[in-house]
Image (spheres, rainbow, N blue to C red):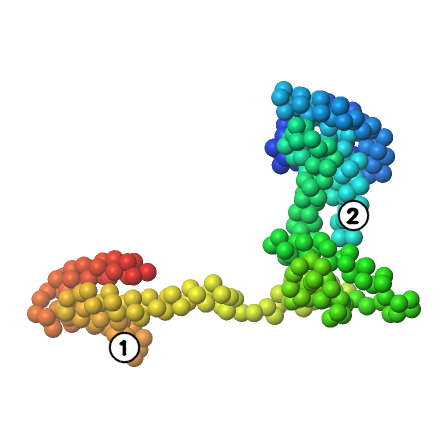
Amino acid sequence: MSATFALAPNAAAASLPAPAAWSRSLTLPPLGNLDAYISAVNRIPMLSAEEERDCARRWREQHDLEAAAKLVLSHLRLVVAISRQYLGYGLPQADLIQEGNVGLMKAVKRFDPAQGVRLVSYAVHWIKAEIHEFILRNWRMVRVATTKAQRKLFFNLRSLKAGLKADNAEGEPVRERLTPAEIDTIARDLGVKREEVIEMEARMSGSDVVLDPLPNEDGEEALAPIAYLADPRHEPTEVLAAREREKLATEGIEQALAQLDERSRRIITERWLNVGDDGHGGKTLQELADEFGVSAERIRQIEAAALKKLRQALQAYA
């Protein structure tokens, strides 16, 4: 684990100078594993209030990378401490720390010492925000929380459930699902609807399903959900597209034909719309030429002009 890892996996995401520029000011040596990294950052001394204000002013006024690096390095232990609060989501702590360090770098970039608060208080929000986003992106294949209320519910439901179970009488069987009374309590405490609590609990209790077939013990592919998914023709966008095509083929054609003169309309109808019992097209150019007393070439010209006008009318209708 290198000093670059200690800051962030993607420094560009924090809109700060590239990791190479930061690394010139860092003092952490290359480290072998997560435990060594945590031990190293916990040994980095914290800055005093005066040192912190001085570094923050140098960064804001002079873009002093060494001052910014000191602010980051002295607060890496804060990221480690916060990351421990999110170990229950099954994601590697190293990844949580990486994302939290991105948040720390963002906080350092925006920190204003003139506001009268310490960086540790200001950075907590940014660190948690980055970790929250990482968890929501990676905890499930399908995101489980997209609104602010759902995010609040997602990150509080687990701890509230644990607290309610701890309050159970000793010897009572451990329940995985919430009771109606517990659902009402959580909904009241978080200020959300009880239906939202029920839905979020169900989504958090579920697991991702592998759609593609996996080989069984015999080396053959077992039946997987992909084999019995709904017919794609019933997918909403396909249904809407089919309805649009049907509408265009009926109302659209009818309105477009109404814009043609009687002779052109009859020629198009007999040539393209009146299909015989054998499935083939209607009358030939010569048959229509005999009917109207003109040459077959003239019928072809009228047909071409009518088709052009029809296309324009259908485009306008669509």
Q: Amino acid at mark 1?
A: Gly
Find residue 276 and name its label. Answer: 1
* Percent of width and height locating residue 53: 71, 25
SS label for mark 1 = loop
The answer to whether residue 310 is left or right of residue 13 is: left
The answer to whether residue 194 is left or right of residue 165 is: left
Q: Amino acid at mark 2?
A: Gln
Q: Is residue 265 above or below residue 32?
A: below
Question: Closest to the observer: 243 or 147?
Answer: 147
Q: Is residue 247 above or below residue 103?
A: below
Question: Which residue is drawn at the image coordinates 78% and 61% (left, top)?
Answer: 161
Residues packed near mark 2 inside 10 Å, few (<14), some (14 to 19) or many (20 plus)? few
Question: Closest to the observer: 157 or 191?
Answer: 191
Find residue 215 and name its label. Answer: none
Give the quadrant of residue 84.
Answer: top right
* Percent of width and height locating residue 241: 42, 64
* Percent of width and height locating residue 14: 63, 35
Question: Which residue is drawn at the image coordinates 73% and 32% (left, top)?
Answer: 118
Q: Which residue is mark 2?
A: 85
SS label for mark 2 = helix
